[in-house]
Image (cartoon, rainbow, N blue to C red):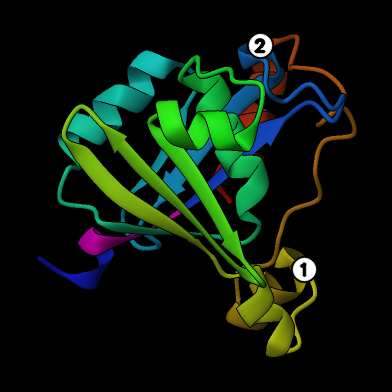
């Protein structure tokens, strides 16, 4: 097993309405091993299927973890009144100590942690994902004008959205 099999990145796309705890507002969750596999997930069943097929994954990374935690909880149907309640009762647990943010997911035998790399990247001089991607040779595409405002409406818009999300 190579490092590409073991280390994955996670990102999500959602409406900027402030209602990201609602599953309908989460458009997708994207997962990538940075090499030969990128996965576009639109439903809880697809997410659970990914978890069951990739139970060897123990670590993931996110540039900004808090939105990904909200998207995971929403897509999985977890709705709690506070982070404390979610951490006690849910499959997706979020902890923050100073600038260190870690999410622990335990679901159907899948047990892994997601680490927030944003503070590390900031310390290295990368203030956003666009700057980091440019430095690494993976420039970020310009988002569709409607992203974060509404979901795609046509097959062509969906295709554009998927391409943008997986980049």
Residue placed most toward the observer, 128 or 84:
84
Q: Is residue 83 left or right of residue 107?
A: right
Asked if one can make out residue 23 in the rendered structure from this viewpoint, the answer is yes
Along the viewing direction, whichever of 11 and 66 lies nearer the viewer = 66
Q: How many residues crowd mark 1 within 10 Å: few (<14), some (14–19), many (20+)?
A: few
Badge 1 is on which residue?
128
| Snapshot quadrant of residue 7 | bottom left
Could you tell whether 9 is left or right of 51 in the image? right
- Tell me where residue 3 appears, x and y as whole percent: 23, 71
Which labelled disc corresponds to residue 24?
2
Q: Secondary structure at mark 2?
A: helix
Q: Residue at x 66, y 57 (%)?
A: 64
Where is residue 70? Give x, y as percent.
Answer: 62, 34
The image quarter in which residue 161 lies? top right
Label of residue 102 in the image: none
Examine the rendered structure and indicate whether residue 36 appears above or below residue 158: below
For the residues labelled 1 and 2, say whether their Cβ atoms are less than 8 Å apart.
no
> Whole-percent x and y of residue 129?
71, 65
Task: Please tell me which residue is depicted at 43% across the width and 45% down the height of the picture.
Answer: 31
Q: Earlier in the sequence, mark 1 or mark 2?
A: 2
* Mark 2 nearby-residue class (10 Å; few <14, some 14–19, many ≥20): some
Residue placed farthest to the bottom in the image? 124
Q: Which residues make up the magenta segment?
A: 5-9
Magenta segment's dominant SS is strand
Name the outermost residue toward the left. Answer: 1
Q: Is residue 69 magenta?
A: no
Horizontal and vertical percent position of residue 43: 46, 16
Q: Residue at x 76, y 88 (%)?
A: 125
Residue in the foreground of this view, choosing between 4 and 93: 93
> What residue lies at 41% left-to-right and 17% top-to-bottom?
44
Which SS class for mark 1? Answer: loop
């Amino acid at each position: 097993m190579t490092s590409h099999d073991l280390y994955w990145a996670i990102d999500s796309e959602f409406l900027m309405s402030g209602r990201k705890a609602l599953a309908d507002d989460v458009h997708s969750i994207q997962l990538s091993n940075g090499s030969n596999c990128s996965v576009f997930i639109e439903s809880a069943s697809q997410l659970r299927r990914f978890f069951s097929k990739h139970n060897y994954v123990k670590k993931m990374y996110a540039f900004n973890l808090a939105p990904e935690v909200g998207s995971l909880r929403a897509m999985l149907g977890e709705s709690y009144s506070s982070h404390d309640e979610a951490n006690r009762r849910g499959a997706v647990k979020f902890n923050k100590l100073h600038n260190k943010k870690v999410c622990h997911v335990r679901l159907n035998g899948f047990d892994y942690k997601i680490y927030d790399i944003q503070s590390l990247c900031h310390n290295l001089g990368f203030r956003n994902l666009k700057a980091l991607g440019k430095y690494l040779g993976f420039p970020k595409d310009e988002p569709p004008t409607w992203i974060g405002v509404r979901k795609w409406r046509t097959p062509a818009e969906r295709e554009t959205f998927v391409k943008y999300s997986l980049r």
